[in-house]
Image (spheres, grey):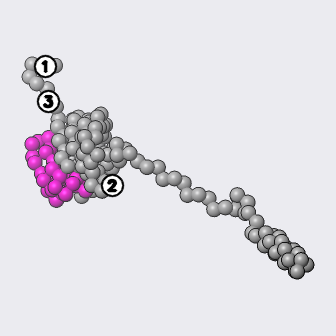
Amino acid sequence: MRSVVFLLMVGLAGSAFLLVGCQPTEQPVADAPAAEPAVPVMSDEDIIRKVGDDFVAAWNASDADSIAGFFAEDGDYLSPDGDYYKGREAIAGSYRTSFEGMYKGTTIMITTTSLRLLETDVAISDGAYEIAGLKDAEGQDMPNIKGLFTNVMTKMGDKWFITCSRPMVPIEMPGTT
């Protein structure tokens, strides 16, 4: 009986040795698939600033529909002239008319000077803009328009939209220099 147990133990030990010897060897690290690079997560502030950058690109391409896409479905826009537009279609129409008229071929630069998150899904941004490339009715160069803006932004899902936009052109008050 002892010899049977001994043979059984030797057999188990030999089997274990063979199993260990049959295990796949570790692949060199160089052959291991490369880990996917981590996608940087943008903060809400960065996303809102990117909306501004994308707005500039759309303006400079005279793309009224893309500009309207930055607005919430029920967003509104009060132009520096005092004209009020509500909803993406009306806003797109406003920009379309502008790009066919006075703002045809213009470019815009935007500088955000203040950005505050009022809630996790509501922000307010203030800044300045400058529109260049204006021409009068005779095709003569006109001075750049410099103005200020305030936008209220709302987060829907993972995107930020302009809920209301208030660009304005400061005027010089009489008697001031």
Please indicate, yes or no, whether residue 107 appears anywhere in the rendered image. Answer: no
Front-most of residues 29 and 19: 19
Q: Is residue 34 left or right of residue 75?
A: right
Res. 158 mark: 2
- Which badge, 1 or 2, comes first in the chain's sequence? 2
Cα separation between marks 3 and 1: 10 Å
Q: Which residues are magenta?
A: 68-95
- Residue 173 highlighted magenta (yes or no): no
Judging by the rendered image, the residue that carries numbered circle 3 is: 171
Are the residues at dot 1 and dot 2 in contact (C-beta closer than 8 Å)?
no
| Mark closer to the chain start, 3 or 1 | 3
Q: Report which residue position mark 1 lands on.
A: 176
Callout 2 crowding tier (Cα within 10 Å): few <14, some 14–19, many ≥20 = few
Residue 102's spot in the image, x, y percent?
Answer: 18, 46
Disc 3 secondary structure class: loop
For the point 21% across and 39% down, which residue is it? 150
Alpha carbons under labels 1 and 2: distance apart: 46 Å
| 69 in relation to 24, above or below | above
Q: Residues within 10 Å of mark 3 (few under 14, many from 20)?
A: few
Q: Secondary structure at mark 1?
A: loop
Rendered-image quadrant of the N terminus: bottom right
Q: Find residue 78 and name its label.
A: none
- The three-letter code of the residue at mark 2 reads Asp
